[in-house]
Amino acid sequence: MQYKKILIMLKPYKYFSLLIICIFMALQGMAQQKTKPLNTHGGNLFSAGFAAGFIGGLYDAFYPYKQLLKQGDFGLGAPGKLDGELLLLNGKLYQTQATGKTTQLIDTGKTPYAVVCFFQPKKVYKRTGELTKAGLFSYLDSLLTNTNGIYAIHIKGKFRLVKTRAFPPVEKPYLPLAAMLDRQHFFNHTDIDGDLVGFRTPAFMEGSFITGYHFHFLSADKANGGHMIDVITQDITVEIDLLNSYTMQLPQTTDFNNFDFKKDRKDDIKSVENGKKQ
């Protein structure tokens, strides 16, 4: 009706009236666009904390879980004072302690280190038959063809074996993680269903992130989990999300301000990832 009224009013000015209508419709479309919420989720890997700093002993929690959940619904990390391992799946946080106990967390705590994203898988693959850890990583390499891509990876299904670990809580003065490998608690889960949540980050992100593959595990019954040390898959579904940016929140603490970042911690990170001295 609005357009008809305008046409009648501007009939003597045929071409001018068409111009006015076009402008009117364009402005109306812009107004409608402004009312639509922008999709700011997806595509970004967010880190609370700096990987090399955490590996080197920055275990004091500083970043609230409530804020972390605004940055992603998928990821992994550590609780304050190194009290086990964290996993974030479908917007829910889980903690696996050194006792093996795994529980869903409320969002009132804080973390010293976590990496998360809003998981929006673009590709899905199914794989049957057993794969060792080396075989799984080789299979993933065949799928993740962008050498310098930042990938979020969800692996769900049946596992012949998942070996996990968790550290017990520590008190100051903190030692680097690589100096506390003898304190790890290991758990062997056989013939188990569950989820691997993780990332593959490229070499140019070394230090600020843990590069290469990094996975945490959560059993289907949510009773077991931890950092993945070893695995033998059986029947799995692999979901992949290629991220295109990363951001980081750094601790504003005296310990971080005085931390020695000049030390090369590549071997320490490898030792911690694999659960043994490299």
Image: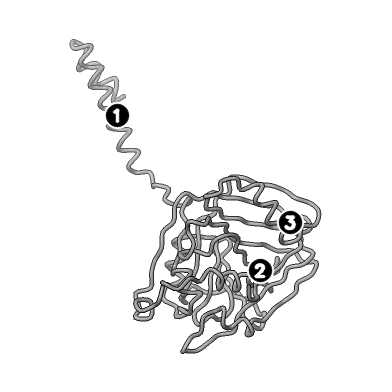
Q: Quadrant of the C terminus?
A: bottom right
Side of 146 relative to 196 (left or right):
left
To which residue does mark 2 refer? 228
Residue in front for this viewpoint, 135 or 123: 135
Tell me the residue at 35%/39% (across/down).
33
Side of 131 relative to 226 (left or right):
right
Tell me the residue at 79%/51% (across/down).
128
In the image, residue 211 above or below residue 143: below
Amino acid type, mark 2? Met
Disc nearest the viewer among 3 and 1:
3
Q: Which of marks 3 and 1 is nearer the N terminus?
A: 1
To which residue does mark 3 refer? 135
Disc 1 secondary structure class: helix
Q: In which quarter of the image is residue 92?
A: bottom right
Q: Earlier in the sequence, mark 2 or mark 3?
A: 3
To which residue does mark 1 refer? 26
Q: Distance between the residues labelled 2 and 3?
A: 15 Å
Amino acid type, mark 1? Ala
Disc 2 secondary structure class: strand
Disc 2: CA contacts within 10 A as few (<14), some (14-19) or many (>=20): many
Query: Percent from the top left, x then y, of residue 261?
Result: 41, 72
In the image, residue 145 above or below residue 175: above
Residue in front for this viewpoint, 86 or 199: 199
Disc 1: CA contacts within 10 A as few (<14), some (14-19) or many (>=20): few
Q: Quadrant of residue 123?
A: top right
Disc nearest the viewer among 2 and 1:
2
Side of 24 relative to 50 (left or right):
left
Q: Which of marks 2 and 1 is nearer the N terminus?
A: 1
| Count of numbered labels shown in the rendering | 3
Disc 3 secondary structure class: helix
Q: How far apart are marks 2 and 1 (CA)?
A: 54 Å
Q: Quadrant of the N terminus?
A: top left
